[in-house]
Image (cartoon, rainbow, N blue to C red):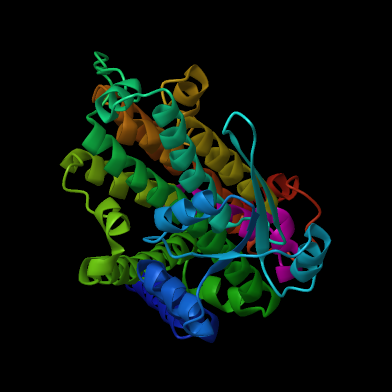
Amino acid sequence: MRDFWIIVQQTFMSKVKTKPFIITSIVMILAVFVMANLSKIVDTFSNMGGDTANELVVVMADDTLYQTLVEQVKDKDIEIKRSEKSNEALIKEVKDEKIEAFATITVDENDMIAVTYQTNKMMDDNAVVLEEALNVIQTAKQTEKLSLTPAEVQTLFTPIAFDEKNISTSVKSDEELGQASVLVYILTFLIYMTVIMYSGMIMTDVANEKSSRVMEILISSVSPVKHMFAKVFGMGLLGMMQMSVLGIAAYIAFTTNKSVGTIGELFKFDNVSPMTLVYCVIFFILGYFLYAMLAALLGSIISRTEDASQMMMPMTILIVIAFIITMSGLGNPELAYIKWASYFPFFTPLVMFLRVGLLDLPVWEPLLAIAIMVVTIGLLGWIGARVYRGGVLMYGPSRSLKDIKKAIQLGKE
């Protein structure tokens, strides 16, 4: 057992001290704090141009309408500037980036307002502000024309009383559903990132040890099976540490920043069932070990780091499919294909947690999925031990997954 923990420690320490790991961790933590302070950062960059007003050039003949429009947008971050230049001259100014946009506003014989808005930006917030303001003005002009009182106008725009009640026994409350959706997003991206990052690290680590012939020294003092499980466990501890640091950073960033508002509220899981949080941890850990076992198995039959990307492809395809299924099921997790996919062990960590988070499932469903995953992990461990025993002694280019059979045969000798 002492040999096992020595390899675990060596695996953990050899990675945690590397520059890529440290830089990746710092970048991830900075990304969290940037997200938490995104509104402040955007405001800062928006104000870097000085105190220049946000101007919108308009061409219009109606003086009354112009005054009404200026009054309508006085509380908005926009200044209406009237121009008498020709359409061609203003288009040239837009192209020369002297102005960002201009609007030509006309009123027909029926007092209906028409606007032609020309801009050099793909998305222009001023266009939205202008449209809303002119809609309000036109509504007021038409109601006055029809001699309607303010109360009658309010009646026209009063929405119907629509109370939706879901009587399904599997649907959770709106509060829990909203927070659980955020939790599903977080777990989905964490597992996706973990599988891609740490499984690849396990595979390349084994390949590096084989290519440098270190593996031959290691397996002379410790069994290949013990070496495989120590690698998986050591890399798992590394991943748990990095994700814990990231989680603590996220908690600090969003709870200490009072300006995050709605975003900060999304990261509060006070309405989420405690069992949902427990399932989150279980599926994350089982998902890691499932793909880590597969990575160690595949990594043992390659002896060059150049072959790692080829062997990673099947795992990448599996996790990408699981990711796509999960994202497609966020709108309706009760679809039949979502249900059946949640029991396929390589999809279970993402898809079953989607169902657990968004639906009130019977206890036996997530427990059955967990049991299937545990059995699959055990099966992969058993097969992996046999492949690893012979695979660590195989050298030369890896041609395909057919090398697994060769590794098993070599391990029997």
Q: Which residues are magenta?
A: 289-312
The x and y percentages for residue 51 are 47, 82
The x and y percentages for residue 363 are 23, 25
Does the magenta-highlighted stretch encompass residue 293? yes
Residue 310 in the figure: left or right of residue 290? right
Residue 275 in the figure: left or right of residue 297? left
Say whether residue 293 is visible: no
Q: Quadrant of residue 299?
A: bottom right
The quadrant the N terminus occupies is bottom left
| Residue at x-position 49% and y-position 85% | 50
Q: Which one is in front, 285 or 336?
A: 336
| Residue at x-position 83% and y-position 61% | 88
Say whether residue 39 is visible: yes
The x and y percentages for residue 266 are 29, 51
Does the magenta-highlighted stretch encompass residue 3? no
Residue 400 in the figure: left or right of residue 146? right
Above or below, 381 relative to 93: above
The x and y percentages for residue 63 are 55, 54
Q: Which one is in front, 120 or 391?
A: 120
| Residue at x-position 35% and y-position 72% | 5
Q: Quadrant of residue 262?
A: bottom left
| Residue at x-position 70% and y-position 63% | 84
- How many numbered circles does the render carry? 0
Residue 404 in the figure: left or right of residue 284? right
Q: Which one is in front, 213 or 161?
A: 161
Above or below, 303 relative to 25: above
